[in-house]
Amino acid sequence: MTSLLIFVVVVLLGVAIWQLTRIFHLTQVGAGTGTHDADTGVASEKDNAVNGYLMFAFVGFIYLFTIYSLWKWGHLVLGTPASEHGPQYDNLMSISMWLIFIVQVLTQFLLHYFAFRYKGEKDRVAFYYADNDKLEFIWTIIPVIVLAGLILYGLYAWTNIMFIDEEAKEDAVYVEVYAKQFGWEVRYAGKDGKLGKANVRYINGVNSMGVDMSDANAEDDIQASELHLPKGKQVIFKFRSQDVLHSAYMPHFRAQMNVVPGMVTQFGFVPTVTTDEMRDDPAIMNKVAHINDLRSKKSAELVAAGKSALDPYQFDYLLLCNKICGQSHYNMQMKIVVESEADFNKWLAGKETLGAAVKKEKDEAAKPAAEETATPAADTTATAKDTTATAKDTVTAAAQ
């Protein structure tokens, strides 16, 4: 790959030098004899014909490359959406892409065809068309209507996606997603259904998200290093950042929200496909098989070089950072598990509350202090015993 890039750079550099040379020749007034069109810098009919055919050939290249791209990389699309709003999002995306594709095909064809059809020829005079209000109205109103329709549909879709049903909020799962260079942490609301207040100033020990433990709602909050979501329930996310701007990106759920230092952003959706169900999706199974085929070939190379083989890949939902946030941005991700509500509740019930974790940390920190306080007394007793033993030995020695 590096060799190919070097070759491309060298070729482009050569083309650039050649073009600069031609520009230099064109600027030399009177350098030629004036007997040939090439000397005067004026394009001949042959030049116009060649450029016309090249323009027409280029539009063919565009179409062929588009078809090749769809065949070669079309399987890389995300596939089945895993959230309630996902199908509407995909539908809006499909409409936009089809409109762009149709317009691109037509306009590119006309642009390059006209360059070929009306190339410069001797004695041909350009037709000057001053104005046509009707034509201008047509080619203005059509894009206006199409774009207005797309914008209105987009606003409708966005409103539905961002809207959080107030009636369902009591039954919703509240999760805080906390970003920091270069990782994620999550915090679930406890039995009270409310997240405690938080601030980076309160970060200390196990309280790595800066939760205000003086807030009564914080006692039963639960911290986790893995994001679990119940299928079919509204999940309301609260996003915070400890340091720089991040972006919480969950591609299979068609969800993304900026994570901004100093403020809380919010997003909500309903997961509709569990992790196990997505693993059984035919498209995902094909992708996993393809990835494992590549990994097995790479593993053979590693083993031959005396290194460890790669582990087989298994599909998992991921929470990614979609803002370049620093040197290890590429590796800032967290596993997402979507499961049944019963399995989710069981997993959450097995987690320690933040209040209990903080109390345990304080108790463990207090133990060494108590032991240090008790140690001098024990040492004094030991010393006394040793002294007594020494005195007794002295008396015995004198008697002898």
Image (cartoon, helix red, strand yellow):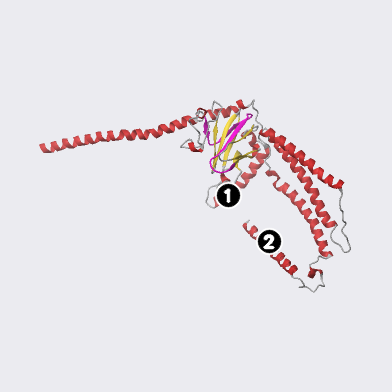
**Residue type, mark 2 in image:** Leu
- Give the camera-side residue of 301 and 219: 219
Q: Residue at x 40, y 33 (%)?
A: 364
Q: Residue at x 70, y 65 (%)?
A: 20
Q: Which residue is mark 1?
A: 300
Disc 2: CA contacts within 10 A as few (<14), some (14-19) or many (>=20): few
Asked which secondary structure carries label 2, the reply is helix
Residue 92 screen position, x and y as percent: 73, 38
> In the rendered view, does 143 fall on the left or right side of 255?
right
Whole-number angstrom distance, CA of label 2 to CA of label 1: 37 Å
Q: Is residue 287 visible?
A: yes
Q: Which mark is residue 12?
A: 2
**In the rendered view of the protein, which quadrant contains the C terminus?**
top left
Please tell me whether mark 2 or mark 1 is closer to you in this view: 2
Asked which secondary structure carries label 1, the reply is helix
Residue 104 screen position, x and y as percent: 77, 48
Q: Is residue 400 visible?
A: no
**Residue type, mark 1 in image:** Ala
Q: Residue furthest bottom?
A: 33
> In the rendered view, does 319 fall on the left or right side of 398?
right
Whether label 2 touches label 1, CB < 8 Å:
no
The stretch of residues the image draws in magenta is 221-246
